[in-house]
């Protein structure tokens, strides 16, 4: 049976300003980079075949960072990330499987029509 971790965060202190609501040096166990180099041994040790990455910040910059990881790491089965729902839509990434809307946008309904944005997640 395959095991999928459906909620994993990756972050880098290079984008600390986007994590400002929660990231601080006082959070010693979290304050540092966490990415594929850290995740792969944990996944192997626990028999996890893949993950869904979830954004840790409401930033299109972090969304790009996560999509870059998804493109380069085959253990990523999908990404839940923030996008600006008011911006023009460009091409959609096939691994963007859901949108995180932590900020309320008064002109939009709480649930975008269609529910899923991605064509399919890796299986």
Image (spheres, helix red, strand yellow):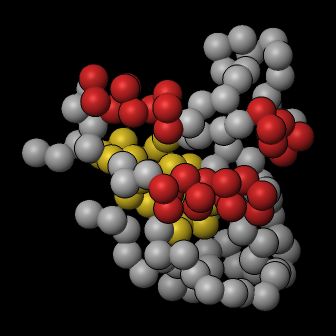
Residue 103: image location, x then y, percent: 79, 59
In the rendered view, tell whether residue 105 sits above or below residue 34. below
Residue placed at 49% from the left, 28% from the top? Answer: 38
Question: Can you tell which quarter of the image residue 40 is in?
Answer: top left
For the question of whether residue 97 can be seen, the reply is: no
The one of 112 and 6 positioned closer to us in this rendering: 6
Q: Quadrant of the N terminus?
A: top left
For the question of whether residue 29 can be seen, the reply is: yes
Residue placed at 75% from the left, 77% from the top? Answer: 85
Residue 102: image location, x then y, percent: 73, 55
In the rendered view, tell whether residue 101 sits above or below residue 31. below
Q: Is residue 72 left or right of residue 50?
A: right
The one of 46 and 103 positioned closer to us in this rendering: 46
The one of 115 and 110 positioned closer to us in this rendering: 115
Question: Can you tell which quarter of the image residue 82 is in?
Answer: bottom right
Q: Quadrant of the C terminus?
A: bottom left
The one of 115 and 43 positioned closer to us in this rendering: 43
Residue 116: image location, x then y, percent: 48, 76
Residue placed at 37% from the left, 75% from the top? Answer: 120
Question: Can you tell which quarter of the image residue 60 is in?
Answer: bottom right
In the rendered view, tell whether residue 79 sits above or below residue 50. below
Residue placed at 72% from the left, 11% from the top? Answer: 28
């Amino acid at each position: 049976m395959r095991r999928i971790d459906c909620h994993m965060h990756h972050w880098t202190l290079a984008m600390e300003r986007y994590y400002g609501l929660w990231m601080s040096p006082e959070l010693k166990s979290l304050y540092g980079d966490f990415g594929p180099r850290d995740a792969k041994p944990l996944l192997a040790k626990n028999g996890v075949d893949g993950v869904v990455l979830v954004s840790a910040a409401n930033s299109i910059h972090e969304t790009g960072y996560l999509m870059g990881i998804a493109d380069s790491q085959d253990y990523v089965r999908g990404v839940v990330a923030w996008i600006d729902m008011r911006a023009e839509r460009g091409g959609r990434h096939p691994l963007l499987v859901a949108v995180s809307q932590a900020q309320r946008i008064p002109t939009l309904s709480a649930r975008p029509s269609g529910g899923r944005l991605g064509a399919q997640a890796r299986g």
